[in-house]
Image (spheres, rainbow, N blue to C red):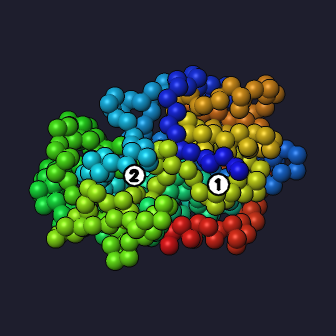
Amino acid sequence: MRKPLLRIPYTELLPPPTTIPPNARSLPGAVTALHEFIKSPPPNGLPPSTVVLSGAGLSVASGLADYRGANGTYRVNKTYRPIYYHEFLASHEARKRYWARSFLGWTSLHTAKPNTGHHAVKDLGQLGLVSSVITQNVDSFHSKAHPELPTLELHGYLRSTVCTSCWNELPRDTFQDELARLNPVWAAFLKDAVASGALGTEDPAKKRARGIWMNSDGDVDVPYAPYTTFRYPACPKCITSPPTLADGSRGVVEVDHDGAGSASNTAGILKPAVVMFGESISNKVKQTAEEYIDSAGRLLVLATSLATYSAWRLAKRAKDRGMSIAVVNIGGVRGEDVFFADLDPQQLGGQRVRVDMSTESLLPTLVEELRRSQTQGAGALPGPVTPLRRSETAVFKDMLS
Ligand SMILES: [Zn+2]
């Protein structure tokens, strides 16, 4: 049996970032190196298309917090520890806490928008320079910014909830309305917080000053909040037809007069449609991610430390295939020494690029430069890439439905 691919947080310190080639320290130098990366044919006759692998840093400019600081430690909130799937399934109290925080975080996440980095990825797709995107982000910003570019959400998405018994999905918006109805005091607190601007994504410093911080999983930390009072609904489908459990018994799916789930429920438990820590990535998603890597000749890693094994192994796969690799990330990257070993010191970006920089202004500047060179006929950009086969994009469409 193949080992399940679990999502597990990486807590080791990351190596210090490098810069390759050396002139990629400045913005113009980094743009030149990435231009070289994109215009150089990949080695070994690999296809001249580029797959993007993105992470939390890309959404920082949209007001979402990254988990990691420049030295790879958890910087956002020293006490923050993501909930594990088994804890979520096992504990009514843990679910109350999760949904209370998620209830407060949803408004900010829902009103946050893709930023210049996501739009630059869209532009790279339209220029025929990027053929597909694999993202670890669960904020749906890629699919909002470029719905036409095949995008695989490796760790799922927050826009839906999913039942852990029948795997039916429900829109998160509808679920949010249910949480507000079941928790009027919390709904009033949220209304006040929104009105005061404390949850406004436009001013993260203000949020912090008021003791509220939103993590990139869309969860909000409110010190001293009485999570034990929070109520959440059960899966509507499982309420009407409770499923049979693994031991052959009938699952318990009970709700009170308002529709709030009971502490004794053993089925019909809704979770966000994200791959939680300690949960396996489905084989379908795992295989599609591998297909995206295998159908490209270049890997462009954007704003991720590759700390999560599921992302790191894709970059490792690209390296093992001999693909050209560029990494744009502030701070160190897991396995940095491996990815950038044995390089020709004379290479200017055609094989490897490593930039210790934010994507926010770098990517739009790169797009401008590529457009200029295309217009002038200089730089000999590759032509449009062959779109992914229908079967490869079908998974993405399935996931959006
Ligand atoms: Zn269900």
Name of the residue lying farthest toward the bottom: 240
The number of discs equals 2
Q: Mark 2 CB in 8 Å range of ligand 1?
A: no
Residue 350: percent from left, percent from top: 77, 39
Q: Is residue 140 visible?
A: no
State the separation of the CA atoms marked 1 and 2: 23 Å
Residue 337: percent from left, percent from top: 68, 25
Q: Secondary structure at mark 1?
A: helix
Q: Secondary structure at mark 2?
A: helix
Q: In front here: 40 or 270?
A: 270
Q: Which residue is mark 1?
A: 286
- 175 vs 325, left or right, is left
- 291 vs 180, left or right, is right
Determine the residue positioned at 35% across, 68% down.
Answer: 235
Of the residues shown, which amino acid type is indicated by label 2?
Leu
Q: In front here: 211 or 92?
A: 92
Residue 313: percent from left, percent from top: 67, 41
Q: Residues within 10 Å of mark 1 (few under 14, many from 20)?
A: some
Q: Which mark is residue 147?
A: none
Of the residues shown, which amino acid type is indicated by label 1?
Lys
Q: Quadrant of residue 158?
A: bottom left
Vertical comparison of 217 with 21: above or below: below
Q: Residues within 10 Å of mark 2 (few under 14, many from 20)?
A: some
Q: Nearer the viewer, mark 1 or mark 2?
A: 2
- Which mark is first along the chain, 2 or 1? 2
Q: In front here: 13 or 55?
A: 13
Q: Is residue 299 visible?
A: yes
Q: Which residue is mark 2?
A: 89
Determine the residue positioned at 16% across, 51% down.
Answer: 229
Residue 88: percent from left, percent from top: 38, 49
Determine the residue positioned at 78% across, 31% down.
Answer: 347
Q: In front here: 249 or 232?
A: 249
